[in-house]
Image (spheres, rainbow, N blue to C red):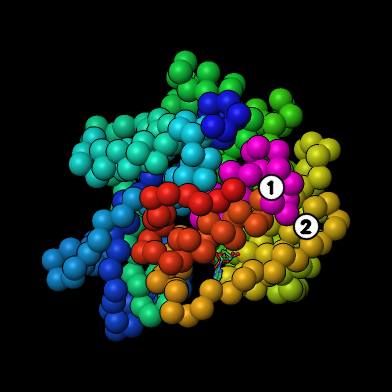
Amino acid sequence: MSPLPENTLIGMCNPLLDIQTTVEKSFLDKWGLKENDAILCDDKHNDMFTELTKDFTVEYIPGGAAQNSLRVAQWILNSPNRTVFFGAVGKDQYGELLATKAKEAGVNVQYQINETVKTGTCAALINGTHRSLCAHLAAANTFTQDHLQKEENQKIIEQAKYFYVTGFFITVCPPAIIQLATHSAEFNKTFTLNLSAPFISQFFFDKLSEIIPLVDVLFGNEDEAAAFAKAHGWETTCVKEIALKAAALPKKSTKPRLVVFTQGPEPVVVVEGDKVTEYPVTRLPKEEIVDTNGAGDAFVGGFLSQFIQGKGIEASVACGSYAAQEIIKKHGCTVPSVCKYH
Ligand code: AP5
Ligand code: NA
């Protein structure tokens, strides 16, 4: 049993049901999608979802970035309700399925339920070893700050010591993010944020910049780091340099900012204050790679499972890499039934 108290880590993001299938490059071209990207869909993609469910064999997999990470963290912690999830779903089958799967994994799901808008979905289109994500947020997009003001959720927020919010949520409800981050700073807790996708830095940079001073731990991959650098006008694509600059950005509290950038099979770059460390990744043999969908989310889940227990950065990165590899060996962000991590 983990000695961690219940509700130690709060995650907040879009709960989405992934509709996963394999497609040809021509399908991506037809719908204006890149091979390796994550975007929000617009009206022109409505027919794409219809085509997918009609003409393709699809798998429905619980998704949504932070919810993936929390499911993975719970799998490693092996003790229910150490993590809580806030996000919005519709009052429908998809929402129920997401709640069931998250609860089975041990996550204390506290959804805001929208009676009139459908649960969000995300097309996860696999093309070779690449994957293109196209999210239709629907109910997830209707999350409001009121949800955090509810008495039972106020209690959970008081109990929590760590917060994990995705950049994806910046498109939905920045005031809710600021609320959690401000609370975290005020009570000397730890607020963590993921850059999530290049489009967040490209199109939501002002909102992102309002949150950064409150961020104690910043996660991202190399593409997201590059987009973040570009938005700042930093003329570099060197991941280490970007991580150093990100760590040095103004910060509300005196705690040094930790920056953790993954780069697929290349070393994980960690900056703590002004110190850079690279943690090598053990490359998985090609034949063991099923799909990398969810690798980044799993990394964060593994990392946080240790970090919230006060374990050091090295142990947190090691567990992050372990979790990512387990997910890469399976379809989507799913884990084997038993966790062998010690
Ligand atoms: P997706 O972006 O696929 O998940 P991810 O977890 O970010 O996976 P990536 O493949 O992008 O990984 P990464 O590049 O971040 O990490 P890296 O390759 O560096 O998103 C999946 C989910 O996003 C879906 O469920 C969807 O619902 C959700 N989503 C999409 N849009 C959304 C929205 N608007 N709102 C909310 N949710 C949304 O790898 C990380 C680590 O993995 C490495 O450090 C390493 O340890 C390991 N690793 C990677 N490659 C290898 C390798 N070849 N060998 C060994 N280890 C490896
Ligand atoms: Na990612």
Mark 2–mark 1 distance (CA, rounded to whole Å): 10 Å
Residue at point 52% right, 23% down? Answer: 156
Q: Is mark 2 within 8 Å of ligand 1?
A: no
Q: Position of residue 290 (x, y in %)?
A: 40, 71
Q: Is residue 312 magenta?
A: yes
Q: Is residue 205 visible?
A: no
Query: Residue visible at 43% across and 36% down?
Result: 107
- The answer to whether residue 321 is seen in the rendering is yes
Tell me: 274 left or right of 258.
right
Residue 20 position, x and y percent, is 30, 64
Q: Which residue is mark 2?
A: 271
Is residue 216 found inside the magenta-colored segment of the image? no
Q: Residue at x 13, y 66 (%)?
A: 54
Question: What residue span does the magenta drawing correspond to?
Answer: 298-315
Give x and y (percent) for residue 160: 59, 28
According to the picture, the residue beneath numbered tag 1 turns out to be 217
Q: Is residue 56 left or right of residue 286?
A: left
Q: Is residue 301 left or right of residue 257?
A: left
Amino acid at pointer 1: Val
Name above or below for residue 239 compared with residue 215.
below
